[in-house]
Image (spheres, rainbow, N blue to C red):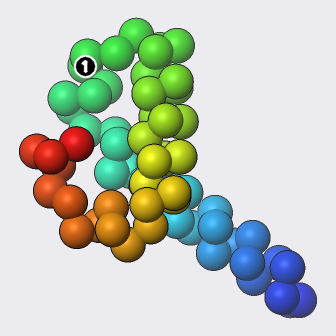
Amino acid sequence: MNNADSKNMGLKRIHKKYRKLFAIPENTEHYSADDYKTAERKFIKYALTHGEDYNQISLEQL
């Protein structure tokens, strides 16, 4: 596996982690299917942008 493949796998793993974090009943029961996708994308973008800083924030602060 070359370096580009390993980076891609790491990014996919992080993406999957944030998708799981977003898929809580509070979100799945609140959003329609289209709105859920939009909100999930925004959440993942925020989480990826803020990196480890995001992991320090409690869910109540989001």
Figure quadrant of residue 26: top left
Direction left: furthest residue: 60
Q: How many marks?
A: 1
Q: Examine the rendered structure and indicate whether residue 19 appears above or below residue 40.
A: below
Question: Up-down: is 25 above or below 18?
Answer: above
> Is residue 17 in view?
no
Residue at image coords 33%, 51% = 21
Question: Where the C terminus falls, by quadrant?
Answer: top left
Q: Which residue is mark 1?
A: 29
Answer above or below: position of 52 versus 62.
Answer: below
Q: Quadrant of the N terminus?
A: bottom right
Tell which residue pokes out farthest to the right in this image: 2
Question: At which x and y percent is residue 38?
Answer: 52, 24
Query: In the image, 24: left or right of 20?
Result: left
At label 1, the amino acid type is Glu
Crowding at mark 1 (Cα within 10 Å: few <14, some 14-19, many 20+) = few
Q: Quadrant of residue 11?
A: bottom right
* Secondary element type, mark 1: loop
Identify the residue at horizontal 85%, vertical 79% (top origin).
4
Q: Is residue 29 left or right of residue 2?
A: left
Q: Nearer the viewer, residue 4 or 1?
A: 4
Can residue 1 be seen at all in this image of the molecule?
A: yes
Instruction: Name the residue rendered at 25%, 19% in the picture.
Output: 29
Counting from the top left corner in percent of width and height, residue 20 is at 38, 50
Indicate the position of residue 37 as horizontal and vertical percent values.
52, 25
Going 56% across and 67% down the picture, which residue do you hit?
13
Question: Picture coordinates of residue 56 (x, y %)?
Answer: 22, 68
